[in-house]
Amino acid sequence: MSKSLNLYAVAIVGVGVTLVGAANFADRFVTPLPAEAPKMTDAPNSVYGMLIAAANAKPGPSEGPMGIGRKALPEEIAAWDLEISPNASELPAGSGSVADGEMLFSNACAVCHGEFAEGVDNWPKLSGGDGTLADEDPLKTVGSYWPYLSTAWDYVHRSMPYGGAQTLSVDDTYAITAYILYSNYLVEDDFVLSNENFLEVEMPNADGFIVDDREETEAHFWDVEPCMENCKDSVEITMRAAVLDVTPEEADAEEEAAAAKVELAAAEPATAEPAVEAAVQTAALNADLVADGEKVFRKCQACHMVGDGAKNRVGPHLNDVMGRAIGGLDDFKYSKVLAEMGEAGTTWTEAEMIAFLADPKGYAKGTKMSFAGLRKEDDQAAIVEYLKSYSQ
């Protein structure tokens, strides 16, 4: 116990000596606090002081409404005023070719809009849709729907590419717009778009819009006090929806099903013989190679169709293509080079098709098909066999 008491006594004495030394040091070297310490607002050059001063200052004269702001300077307005009207009077001087536009489009636009402007997934299609505006589900693209080319140029220059708006130069915008026109078969592959020939391009749907005059012509409907209850003595259905996926009434469904059975039974005898004939015609095909070709053809489906109901898309349908004259469909506008080859008598033989598939642009310089080609000979042979199966 005596040893513990001694240790406590030594510790207490040490603490006391330290406190005494600290007090003496403070008396000699630390500046004493003034009676009233300065406040943060007393330092006019401090950030806090400047904020307080600004808040307490009286507002000066202003040009804006309610004493706020000022009028925008002409150069500030010009920086925002990018709109190009239908008469293209605001277009800047510049030009761009289809060839340059193809490269720019591939690098900056194809990831969303496809190499041929056919659209990727749910991203917008910019080409195709010709003649579909009267359909139940029209395809509205630059070629089929837009009445003014200035809209395309303006949108590309102002808002594209996605995530990099207004990074394209004026000439780049002309070139990309030219390529979009080319993808819609509105210009040839050697076309150069500029501010000088801009209005010479004819848009297919230029006359498809009317002035919205409802504010004047339908104003009498809006002035009438609306009926809120008991507006009609009775309500009856006067017509049916034309949309195919509307659920029919049960009676209608039964009648349609019965009619379908009768129609199917009547058609069976007539279709039996052609089915046998088709089997005989396709017997010479390599079934395994056709199956491989169907898989490879997925690379082509964005632009081409085959089979029942096949239609022209960005590219022509390929039913009966093998043995047909190159550029031989009357209802499709081919590039100049392919049209001339067909006029010279060249047909799609196996050798010609394989040469085209291997290097489209090398085979037909100026072709609208910008697909790079199939490098593997097995893929080329498979596609040819697959197309032969639709050319019997």
Image (cartoon, rainbow, N blue to C red):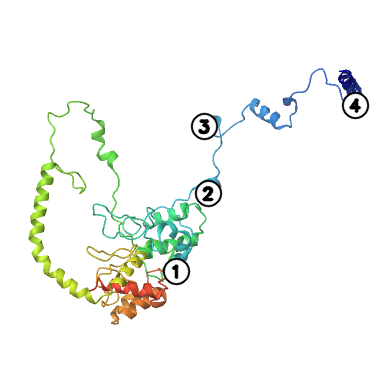
Q: Amino acid at mark 4?
A: Phe
Comparing labels 3 and 4, the label whose residue is closer to the camera:
4
Q: Gap between marks 4 and 2, in whole Å?
A: 63 Å
| Circle 2 residue | 79
- Residue 343, image quadrant: bottom left
Q: Which residue occupies 27% across, 75% down?
A: 322
| Circle 4 residue | 29
Query: SS for tag 1?
Result: helix
- Rendered view: 324 above or below 296: below
Where is residue 249 shown, x and y percent of the image?
14, 42
Q: Amino acid at mark 1?
A: Ala
Earlier sequence position, callout 2 versus callout 1? 2
Residue 93 appears in the rendering: no
Q: Gap between marks 3 and 4, in whole Å?
A: 60 Å
Badge 2: how crowded within 10 Å, few (<14), some, or many (20+)?
few
Comparing labels 1 and 3, the label whose residue is closer to the camera:
1
Comparing labels 1 and 4, the label whose residue is closer to the camera:
4
Badges 3 and 4: C-beta atoms under 8 Å apart? no
Relative side of 90 to 307, left or right: right
Tell which of 20 and 235 is nearer to you: 20
Q: Which residue occupies 50% across, 47% down?
A: 80
| Circle 3 residue | 65
Q: Gap between marks 1 and 4, in whole Å?
A: 82 Å
- Rendered view: 303 above or below 158: below
- Rendered view: 173 above or below 58: below
Q: Gap between marks 2 and 3, in whole Å?
A: 23 Å
Badge 3: how crowded within 10 Å, few (<14), some, or many (20+)?
few
Earlier sequence position, callout 2 versus callout 3? 3
Tell which of 15 and 277 is nearer to you: 15
Relative side of 277 to 357, left or right: left
| Circle 1 residue | 99
